[in-house]
Amino acid sequence: MSTIGSPDPSHEPTPEEMASALADLEALANQSSVTVSPPRPPATGETKRVRKLRAEVAEAHLLADLQDDDAPLLLDTPKVRKRRKAAQQAARLHALAQDPEMRAWQAARMRRLLVTAALVSLTLALAWSTAGVQHFAADGAAPWSPAWIFAWLVEPFLSLALLVVVGARAYLGTRGQPLDDPKLVRIEWLFLALTLAMNAWPYLPLVAADFSLSRLVLHVLGPIVAVAVVTALPIILAAFSGLDHGSSGTPTSPSYRVNAATLDKLTIKARRLISTGQLSVDSGADKFRRALGCGMDTARAVRDALRNNPI
């Protein structure tokens, strides 16, 4: 009895079975002998030059896109920032210069400078004439004699007396209280006339033995400069006192409270001048100041009092 699934040893293969087995063996042999090769990449033709040019084109497209963006142009360079800073500073300085308080400070500073320069010039002019006055006062005295030595003191004490008057008028003028008293004016001109006469006398045409115009001009130069300074300084100070620095500005000189008795006295004097036709109620404050010999603030107070109460 035979087992199921096991070949029968007594069975002989037929010719058909033998041919089928041989065909299977040949197919297996052919399959094992075939060598599998990797697929080759398609031939694209890209060389090194092609890849380089492709990179350049891509870069050009990116640059073109970035060039259309104006963001870098909106940024300030260091030079632009420096110019903008300078322009802002100039604008602020200009605005500050228009401020009434700054204008008042500048005027006060300039006034002090001009007064200082005028007094220095006056001092040098009087010192220049010292030699001429000494020559006149010595009157031919021997050098180093008492008369010759004391002749050097004539010009200094004249100059000091003149500087006292001029200095007082200049200082009070800067404080808003100019001195226009006729007596002081006459004293100034007296000192200046004496200085001029003593400098010029020895060199006049009918006095000098050998007249020389250049020597005469040289010796009268100092007194002439002194006369010019003394004449111009009050006018300059009066102009500074009348400056208007704006509605909220600080006056060039400080305002002082006018004493009631002084105001009444000056108001009566102003009425008297108006009645004689020397002054008008419609005149400016500077004309009141010159007529009454007072400060600008006092002159304004008198003018306003007369306008408010014309009777």
Image (tube, rainbow, N blue to C red):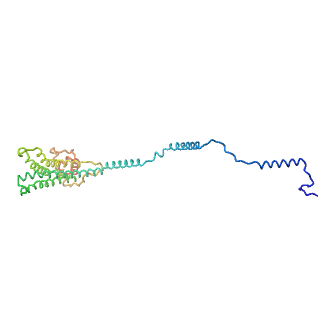
Residue 232 appears in the figure? yes
Q: Pick the residue in front: 189 or 125.
A: 125
Left or right: 173 as drawn, with respect to 76:
left
Residue 311 appears in the figure? no
Left or right: 86 as drawn, with respect to 265:
right
Q: Pick the residue in front: 221 or 289.
A: 221
Left or right: 268 as drawn, with respect to 39:
left
Q: Position of residue 155 (x, y in %)?
A: 11, 53
Q: Position of residue 284 (x, y in %)?
A: 22, 45
Q: Position of residue 293 (x, y in %)?
A: 17, 50
Q: Position of residue 138 (x, y in %)?
A: 7, 53
Q: Pick the residue in front: 281 or 225.
A: 225
Q: Pick the residue in front: 207 or 181.
A: 207
Left or right: 48 as drawn, with respect to 78:
right
The quadrant the N terminus occupies is bottom right
How many numbered discs sit on the rendered protein?
0
